[in-house]
Image: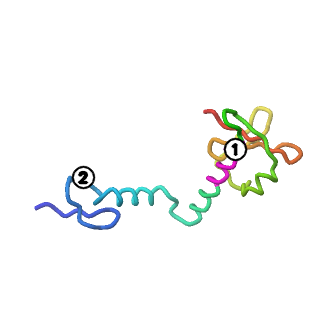
Amino acid sequence: MEEARSCLQCGRVIKGRIDKKFCDDGCRNAFNNKQKTGNTPLMRHINNILRKNRQLLEDIIPEGEGMGKTTKRKLTDAGFNFTYHTHQYTNKKGDTYGFCYEFGYLLLEGDWVLVVKNQK
């Protein structure tokens, strides 16, 4: 006799293929979405900050261009948080760029910020 299998998301009995893990697409999507989001409120909060930072940097660069310029004040007023970034890059001249995924920024003199997109 076959052992009853239960849905990984809701626990209902699964009918159908032997390798099936979820009772329907809704449960499969809910389970996968839960796996992809941060496990703790702190992780979700930081990921939200990084996504917002990335979007703000992307909005600075004109369509079809590889870089743009703005002021630190404009970024801060829009909600950019300079504390959080995904990684840093230091070029041969010694300039250190902060990156939020593929969009980076370099703090320049006089409150200016250079925003670049990593093409790799």
Task: Say which element carries label 1.
Answer: strand
Image x and y of residue 120, in percent: 60, 33
- Provide the residue designation for mark 2: 19
Determine whether, in the image, residue 94 is placed left or right of residue 84. Answer: right
| Cα gap from disc 2 to disc 1, whole angstroms | 43 Å
The outermost residue toward the front is 63
Number of numbered discs visible in the structure rendering? 2
Work out whether mark 2 precedes mark 1 in sequence or the reverse, and give the earlier one: 2
Residue identifier under label 1: 88
Classify 99 as above or below 48.
above
Mark 2, secondary structure of its residue: loop
The image quadrant that residue 89 belongs to is top right
Task: Tell me, yes or no, whether the two marked residues, 2 and 1, touch with CB atoms within 8 Å.
Answer: no
Q: Position of residue 83 (x, y in %)?
A: 72, 56
Give me the residue at 75% from left, 39% from top. 68
Residue at the farthest right position: 110
Region rendered in magenta: 50-60
